[in-house]
Amino acid sequence: MRFFLIHDSFTELPDWPAALPPQGFLWVTCSRRVFEVQLERAQQHLQRLAGGGLVDLHVSDLINPQLPSQYDYTSWYDLLVFRRLAAGQGTERMFLDEERGTASSASQALAAIDTSPVGFAVFDRVLLTVHPADCSVRDFFQTRLSQLGQGSHATGDNGQPPAGELSRPVHDDEEAHLGVDPQLIEEHHLAGLAHGHRTEGRGPSRLPPSPADLMLRIVNHMVDSYLDLRRLLTRQLGYLQQDMLRSSGRFRHWQALLASRNTLHMLEDICEDQRSALQEWIDALEDWPVPTDPVAAREREVLRVRSRDVQEHIERVLNHVRRLETSSESAVQMHFSLQGSRTNAIMRTLTVLTAIFLPLNLITGVFGMNFDALPLIHASHGFWLAFGLMALVVVMLVWWFRRNRYLGD
């Protein structure tokens, strides 16, 4: 269990603090097993620092490794459980290059997909995250926030940027991506400086101003980690489809293809759960009391924009998963269509051969009758005349079949 105090700087604490400082908030992060072992102690400190502990049902949700994405709330905290969509470690080495792989590597890559849930308990000034033991999200944000916290030392002693930089704040690229009005950003920045507050994303620190903002950043990072998974799925499905549509040989990796389709169905269900949970969070966010402070009001608006941006990312992931499902279904249909076309070509060839040999069998049967008065039976040139007649029939039938396109070129 690790503790980080976030305000104008990013500071790691050795243990639960005795009290929260006047400004900033506390981020407590731990693995699921550690949280289960230290639950009683964590409940006591949450009661002391946040004004209330976790409900028993929510505790069960946080320690459940199979729980789908969902959202719930109480009067003193919000709970969000969000499942990851990430490629497993070492999956990038399972393919020979960007195009080629093997059926075994594709199956191993599918089995290595990480969909473990991460739980968030969002209090007013405390954020509790419960994650798997090998989750890299915490390490990423610890490094990221440490770098952002170091940037806050560039401000002056009064918390304001040096002279000449006050009129034009440094805009966060992430907020520009969210589509926030630059004028709103500048007004928010100036108003925050006037009230002595640090404004998120407006100065050099760019640290999250609230537990909810940090939660949304982590969730957005978890959604964006699907990019690596998208490359993995595209590569393995591309290999299976190429192998399926190959003209020579027979497709033998139906088990791997079935596992791929089942995985895509599972990812679609996870994305739909993610979308539903985040939509419930957005609906609950609309019911929060409207802050009277202009800076807090603008931060609330940025929080709404960030939430909608995360939801849009989830929609993109869901659309991509559905496109992969459609692509795999189309490949299977094309495979069976090709198989049917090959079967038809074989049957057409056999039919033509039967049609050619049918008159030859008729001629042979006529001259094979046991009658003495048959013509050409006793003639010395009778065999050659019969053979020439059969050859002429074969040539005429082949010419007629080619003219009517019953035989290929």
Image (spheres, rainbow, N blue to C red):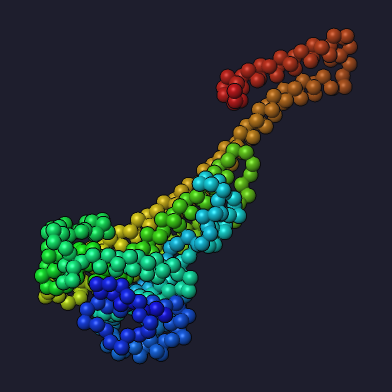
- The picture places residue 4, in percent across and down from the top left corner, at 34, 77
Residue nearer the viewer, 286 or 340: 286
Write down the quadrant of residue 364 in the picture: top right
Residue nearer the viewer, 137 or 385: 137
Would residue 357 be found to the left or right of residue 265 on screen? right
Residue nearer the viewer, 317 or 169: 169
- The picture places residue 136, in percent across and down from the top left corner, at 44, 67
Q: Residue at x 24, y 59 (%)?
A: 172
Write down the quadrant of residue 195 in the picture: bottom left
Q: Residue at x 69, y 28 (%)?
A: 353
- The picture places residue 50, in percent across and down from the top left corner, at 28, 85
- The picture places residue 86, in percent across and down from the top left corner, at 45, 62
Q: Is residue 392 visible?
A: yes
Q: Residue at x 25, y 68 (%)?
A: 153
Task: Identify the image quadrant of the N terminus.
Answer: bottom left
Would residue 228 be found to the left or right of residue 393 on screen? left
Please determine whether, in this image, residue 352 is positioned above or below residue 292.
above
